[in-house]
């Protein structure tokens, strides 16, 4: 089992920045990838970025060059630095961890990000 707790959402004007944090606990040894997803009203949940244990990262095309994902292994945290925010980034952001061997997904409770124009 893995527990995830997000923090750092809020309201920001377009062009601004926010930093999301996700603290993980539990069966840390089983996690092989962590990431951030988002879900806007009326839309499906989509991948924003993820980072594998070896440090390889992947980003959605819509956030490349603006968002940066990183991990602090000493603190069991994954960070999403979001710069140059746009109104279309408005969504609930969820932290995710995927574990081996069954590829189970664990989710945080979500944190609201609202970008005003």
Image (cartoon, grey):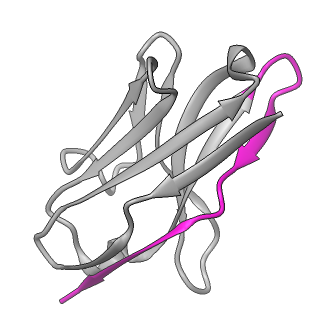
Quadrant containing the N terminus is top right
Along the viewing direction, whichever of 62 and 17 lies nearer the viewer: 17
- The spot of residue 115 in percent (x, y) is 27, 80
- Residue at x 50% of width, y 45% of height: 22
Q: Give the answer, above or below, for where 84 lies relative to 77.
A: below
- Residue at x 45% of width, y 26% of height: 75
* Quarter location, residue 32: top right
Q: How many marks?
A: 0
- The spot of residue 70 in percent (x, y) is 35, 31
User: Over which residues does the magenta segment extend?
Assistant: 99-117
Q: Does residue 105 belong to the magenta stretch?
A: yes
Q: Tell which residue pokes out farthest to the right in this image.
A: 102
Left or right of 15, for residue 60: right
Left or right of 54, for residue 99: right
Q: Give the answer, above or below, for where 58 lies relative to 114.
A: above
Q: Tell which residue pokes out farthest to the left in this image.
A: 15
- The spot of residue 33 in percent (x, y) is 59, 26
Q: Tell which residue pokes out farthest to the bottom in this image.
A: 117
- Residue at x 77% of width, y 40% of height: 105
Left or right of 102, for residue 94: left
- Residue at x 64% of width, y 45% of height: 4
- The spot of residue 63 in percent (x, y) is 30, 53
Q: Give the answer, above or below, for where 7 lies relative to 69.
A: below
Left or right of 61, for residue 108: right
* Quarter location, residue 55: top left
Quadrant containing the C terminus is bottom left
Q: Does residue 14 belong to the magenta stretch?
A: no
């Amino acid at each position: 089992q893995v527990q995830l707790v997000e923090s750092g959402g809020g309201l920001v004007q377009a062009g601004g920045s926010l930093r999301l944090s996700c603290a993980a606990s539990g069966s840390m040894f089983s996690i092989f990838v962590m990431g951030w997803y988002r879900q806007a009203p009326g839309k499906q949940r989509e991948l924003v970025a993820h980072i594998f244990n070896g440090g390889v990262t992947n980003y959605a095309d819509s956030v490349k060059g603006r968002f940066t994902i990183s991990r602090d292994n000493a603190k069991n945290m994954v960070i999403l630095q979001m710069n140059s925010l746009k109104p279309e980034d408005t969504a609930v952001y969820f932290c995710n961890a995927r574990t081996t061997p069954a590829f189970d997904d664990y989710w945080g409770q979500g944190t609201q990000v609202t970008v005003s124009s």
